[in-house]
Image (cartoon, helix red, strand yellow):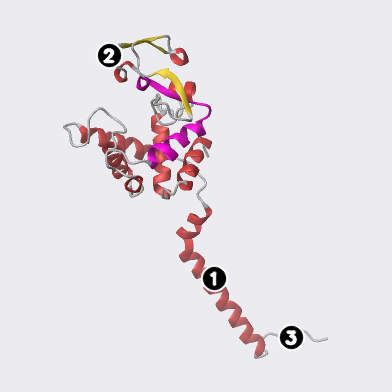
Amino acid sequence: MTPYDQIVYDLARQEGFTDIVAKMMAAQARLETSLNGVDYNTNNFKCNNNMFGMKYAGQPLATKGTLAPSSEISSNCSASGSDCNRKGVGSCKNGDFYARYNSPEDSAKDAIQRLFKITINGITPEQINQATDSTSYATVLKKRSYYGFKQYGEAGAQQEIDGYAGAIRARLKRVSVSEWVADVYKNNKTNFAIVGGLLIGLTAYMYILYKKGYILKNKK
């Protein structure tokens, strides 16, 4: 079991997200930190404890971290240094930098307890929570302008959705968490009811046999 998966999953469940959405958020963290086929491997994660590719916006749990890639920064901003020492030169804005967190858990809190709990572009947290698979999840994130370079409805946006959904779907297979006990019971309540009914029936049957003398009573 990967501790980072569990951190994301538990926080999401605590915030009221469904089991499948919580797991997709864990898969999303894997995707956002994936490098060369290895999850939780990007410089952003290693240098900034940043699990969701979050940019710096003055959020309470973050400070200004390393400069984002050149394709994601403003035109008057350029890079100096590399890896954890990648800094901005020129007229750089807060959004040109990744957010830096004290821990991966703070990163997960910033995404799940703040960003995913507010309405963006008219898309509410409840609509995120209605996602049932990677495609619907990727679609609702696109509507919130979470990833990619195309806005929802623009030419090329669907290709970005399909690509993001496919990446989430692949990483869902890698997610390893201990599910909440309540969900385990809910998912297996039919089996529990059957077993419970059988035990009750068996107990009643044995009692009838005992009363009729088929089962010998102990004699002093």
Is 22 magenta? The answer is no
Which numbered disc flags the more N-terminal residue, 1 or 3? 1
Q: Which mark is residue 58?
A: none
Q: Where in the figure is residue 15, as x and y percent of width and height?
A: 45, 46
Q: Give the residue pinned by disc 2.
A: 75
Label 2: how many residues lie within 10 Å, few (<14), some (14-19) or many (20+)? few
| Between marks 1 and 3 in the image, the one whose residue lies nearer the viewer | 1
User: Which amino acid is tagged 3?
Assistant: Lys
Q: Is residue 103 visible?
A: yes
Q: Amino acid at mark 2?
A: Ser
Q: Residue at x 19, y 31 (%)?
A: 156
Query: Under tag 1, what secondary structure?
Result: helix
> Which circle, 3 or 2, is nearer the viewer?
2
Query: In the picture shown, does residue 54 fall above or below 11?
Result: above
* Callout 2 secondary element: loop
Q: CA distance from mark 3 to mark 2?
A: 92 Å
> Which residue appears farthest toward the left when viewing the image?
155
The residue depicted at 27 percent of the width and 42 percent of the height is 122
Using the image, tell me which numbered label, if any, was put on residue 196: 1
| Crowd rating for badge 1 (residues with CA inside 10 Å; few <14, some 14–19, many 20+) | few
Q: Find residue 89 and report its horizontal and vertical position in percent.
A: 37, 9
x, y percent for residue 147: 30, 31
Amino acid type for the residue under numbered disc 1 = Gly
